[in-house]
Amino acid sequence: MTDSTVRVCTLCNKDFDPDAPSTLYAEAGEWLAREVWSDAGELCPLCRENRARLTMMYCQEYYR
Ligand SMILES: [Zn+2]
């Protein structure tokens, strides 16, 4: 298997396609991964979305 387009999420261990179109939350999660957690490209869109939602819930000061 040399399919370089499929990656395994480091959080949930599921395969995902890093080139798949992302949602608004997934893009926010992508930014957080780059700027805050330094693990961009290692999480599947679902985990990025979950992280973005949690961050928006607990870090309200960013969204005033
Ligand atoms: Zn995941």
Image: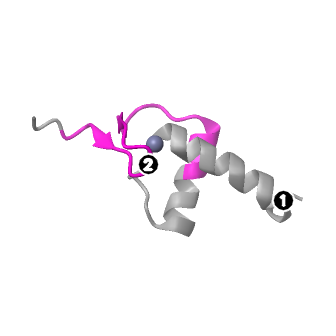
Picture quadrant of residue 18: top left
Mark 2 CB within 8 Å of ligand 1: yes
The residue furthest left is 1
- Residue pictured at 83% horizontal, 57% vertical: 63
The residue furthest right is 64
Question: Is-magenta flag for residue 6?
Answer: yes
Residue labelled with disc 2:
43
Cα separation between marks 1 and 2: 23 Å
Picture quadrant of residue 7: top left
Question: Could you tell me residue 61's position as x and y percent?
Answer: 85, 65
Please tell me the numbered disc located at residue 33.
none
Decide: few, some or many residues near mark 1? Use Cα within 10 Å; few <14, some 14-19, many ≥20.
few
User: Circle 1 sits in a helix, a strand or a loop, which is it?
Assistant: helix
Quadrant (top left, top right, bottom left, bottom right) of the N terminus: top left
Please name the predominant secondary structure of the magenta segment in the image. Answer: loop
Quadrant (top left, top right, bottom left, bottom right) of the C terminus: bottom right
The residue furthest top is 21
Question: Could you tell me residue 51's position as x and y percent?
Answer: 61, 50
What range is drawn magenta here? 4-29
Question: Is-magenta flag for residue 10?
Answer: yes
**Residue type marked 2:** Leu
Decide: few, some or many residues near mark 2? Use Cα within 10 Å; few <14, some 14-19, many ≥20.
many
Mark 1 CB within 8 Å of ligand 1: no
- Residue pictured at 58% horizontal, 34% vertical: 23
Lower sequence index among marks 1 and 2: 2
User: Circle 2 sits in a helix, a strand or a loop, which is it?
Assistant: loop
Question: Height in image: 52 above or below 25?
Answer: below
Residue labelled with disc 1:
60
**Residue type marked 1:** Gln
Total numbered badges shown on the rendered structure: 2
